[in-house]
Amino acid sequence: MRPFEFLQVQTVADALDALQQPGTSLLAGGTNLVDLMKYDVARPRRVVDISRLPLREIRATHDGGLSLGALVANSDAAYDALVQTHAPLLASAILAGASAQLRNAATTGGNLLQRTRCFYFYDVGTPCNKREPGTGCSAIGGVTRMHAILGTSEQCIATHPSDMCVALAALDATVSIAGRSGERSVAVADFHRLPGDSPHIDTVLAPGEIIVGVQLPRWKYGAHYSYLKVRDRLSYAFALVSTAAALEISAGRIVSGRVAVGGVAHKPWQRTEANDALAGQLPTRETFTRVADLLLEDAEAHGDNAFKIPLAHRTIVRALSQAAAGTPQSQTDKRVS
């Protein structure tokens, strides 16, 4: 790890001032940044500890939604009574991720900003456009089992590793962002970028801005939700494919539905057409198969990740079936129901 200056701040304004100095990185839980520094992928000249900022509140909003501060620990969010009542899909997705120890440290804002777990991104001895733009993508033509099948480019085929963000995307959550010119909100669905020609830019967060919270709309899906994560082992592993599914069902028909897929792209993967295809339909396997077809119609294999396409299809159908039946996937007993 390279030498760096360390600074602690007490207010959001102080954090924004600190970010004006080039080479500055913010430290919250440190579960990703510290790893990147150890591997020499991240080389900040100054690290600013923001863990004392007053951003740890979980509260109900006037419109029946929820507000989570950027420094709410993942474990606190997952076990909070408000979250479990008003956004159980989010709680389930968080519990599917990492380990209990990491969830105790990781934060809401940090989870949104975590970098890809691509082997080549972490190996500074190999070319990587995400790490050093213009050097090439070693994953293309390399070991690609964990890599993307959707939204890729000739510059990058990495995936976004978060579970929490997949649920937030399905729930139409928004990210609250503060900058020196004021605050703005961005939908989680628009917060992460596809790689295109600039894979080193993961999100729409501008230089000098900081995440201050996440806002969730009113929960309207009753018991009809599920977060299903398929991985190489049953704990402490990133998703090969995951699906967050939520259905609003009345009189035996789907009123509305939301689906987001993880482990398959540079961001949680959604399609408006797939969500629209749920409205007014019977909650049947035929309906869910059609939705899976829509979500995956542009899927493209890269070497040894071809298995992800049929796996993603089955995972989407199964997650929607679990949601329709009101039997959400257990994150304690991980056997698929």
Image: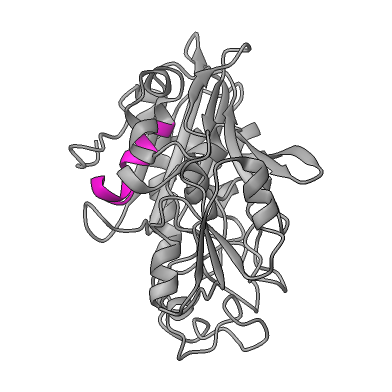
Nearer to the camera, 161 or 181: 181
Q: Residue at x 30, y 57 (%)?
A: 231
Percent position of residue 170, x then y: 54, 36
Q: Is residue 202 visible?
A: yes
Residue extending furthest top?
251
Q: Is residue 188 visible?
A: no
Percent position of residue 317, x then y: 42, 41
Colouring of the image: one colour
Principal secondary structure, stretch drawn in magenta: helix
Q: Please indicate whether residue 20 sits to the left or right of residue 304 in the image.
A: right
Q: Please indicate whether residue 310 sits to the left or right of residue 128 in the image.
A: left
Label count reads: 0
Q: Residue at x 57, y 13 (%)?
A: 64
Residue extending furthest right?
181
Q: Residue 326's quadrant in the figure? A: top left
Q: Is residue 306 above or below residue 263?
A: below
Percent position of residue 186, x then y: 70, 41
Percent position of residue 318, x then y: 36, 40
Q: Which residues are magenta?
A: 90-103
Nearer to the camera, 262 or 95: 95
Q: Is residue 223 above or below residue 19?
A: above
Q: Is residue 255 above or below residue 173?
A: above
In the rendered image, residue 75 lying in the magenta stretch gets the answer no
- Quadrant of the image for the C terminus? top left
- Quadrant of the image for the N terminus? bottom left
Q: Residue at x 51, y 48 (%)?
A: 50
Nearer to the camera, 207 or 174: 207
In the rendered image, residue 100 lying in the magenta stretch gets the answer yes
Q: Residue at x 82, y 44 (%)?
A: 181
Q: Residue 324's quadrant in the figure? A: top left
